[in-house]
Amino acid sequence: MLNWGVIGPGGIAHVFCNGMRFTDTGQILAVGSRTESRAEDFAQNFDIPRHYGTYEALLADDDIDAVYVATIHPHHAEWMIKAAEANKHVLVEKPLSINHATAVTMVEAARKNDVFLMEAFMYRCHPQIQKMVELIQDGEIGEVRFIRSSFGFQAGFNPDSRLFNREMGGGGILDVGCYTASFARKVAGAAANKPFLNPISVKANGKVGPTGVDHIAAATLKFENEIVAEIATTVECNIGSRATVYGSGGTIDIPQPWLPSSPCRGTRSPLPLDTPFPPSKIILNSSQRGETTEITVEVDRDLFTYEADMVANHIADRQAPAMSWDDTLGNMHLLDAWREEIGMAV
């Protein structure tokens, strides 16, 4: 049983703590906030035994084994490194940091202090992604040729909000575009029987707003195995969430690529322990067989429970197969290139 501490009791921390209600690999022991009252309210909501009015106090708790860093992007590096120096294993919300160079220092901190580190791409921990890889590697759609993935929504422009504040890591690419980048790299790797591939070419265009962050961004990627990918993100209009893999003999369509089987997402109140978890769906269109099949991926826990279990099951390895250090650094390098291509400072 891992004893977890949560740094930053924001919206995503509520989701993670809900997910922890459905696991037997760990428990939330403590929550830390910059204000005592906020930490206390969060702890009472989820029946968490301990709460701290500073992050430093949480890290000083010797009973905590692992820390979930759920702060905004620019603060990830500071608290991940301090957690590693306190000999805590660390799960850090995506993106790991605001750029590749900072991410490298975080990985080195984990290596130096011999602790676990994973970037919290929860969708990578779900059985849906493993099923997709299986379909690709079994040749169900022939050879992979093209990948398309999108994640975008409409947020009213507010220069003071996190989404539109450059100093707070705003913009669509860092907020949700990182999912589309990681998906394309995962699929290209699966086609080559590897955990991931990094693109050899990145071409992009987009709209950068008055506060210096991307409102709309799209990129075309090319991989060494000749696969081409198109990825897109927005915070200015709703383009939805979809991921499709096109092969020489059919397609794989994933209607809910980022948030499958997650009743925990979107609620701040503790879910009942008898909450049902809906299966996810993959649509396989085989031109080779001339048929379309809806594949049901059964699950027995929440998406964020799978993420917590991924950490617990790979603590001894210091990395997890869902998102290894090299995988994270490759994705951060791509996000840097994407932003530079559309004229953003990195």
Image (cartoon, rainbow, N blue to C red):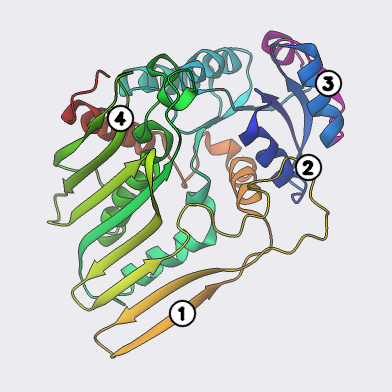
Q: Quadrant of the C terminus?
A: top left
Q: Which of 50 and 253 is in front in this view?
A: 253
Task: State whether residue 192 appears in this view.
Answer: no
Looking at the rendered structure, which numbered label has been put on residue 40? Answer: 3
Kind of residue at badge 3: Glu
User: Which residue: 60% across, 60% down?
Assistant: 261
Q: Can you give x and y, in whole percent of width and height, for residue 183 in the image? A: 35, 50
**Magenta residues?**
47-61
Is disc 2 in contact with disc 4, using a CB cutoff of under 8 Å? Answer: no
Tag in front: 4 or 3: 4
Residue 90 magenta-drawn? no
Q: Which of marks 4 and 3 is nearer the N terminus?
A: 3
Residue with the mark numbered 2: 269
Q: Do the residues labelled 4 and 1 touch (CB within 8 Å)?
A: no
Q: Where is residue 215 in the image (x, y as percent from the top left)?
A: 32, 33
* The quadrant where residue 171 appears: top left
The 10 Å Cα crowd at callout 4, few under 14, some 14 to 19, many 20 or more, is: many
- The residue depicted at 29 percent of the width and 32 percent of the height is 335
Residue at image mark 1 = 294
SS for dot 4: strand
Task: Please report contact status of discs 4 and 3: CB closer than 8 Å, yes or no.
Answer: no
Instruction: Give amino acid for label 2.
Output: Ser
Name the mark nearer the viewer: 2 or 4: 4
What secondary structure is marked by label 2? loop
**Mark with earlier residue (2, 4):** 4
Q: Nearer the viewer, mark 4 or mark 1?
A: 4
Mark sitting earlier along the chain (2/1): 2
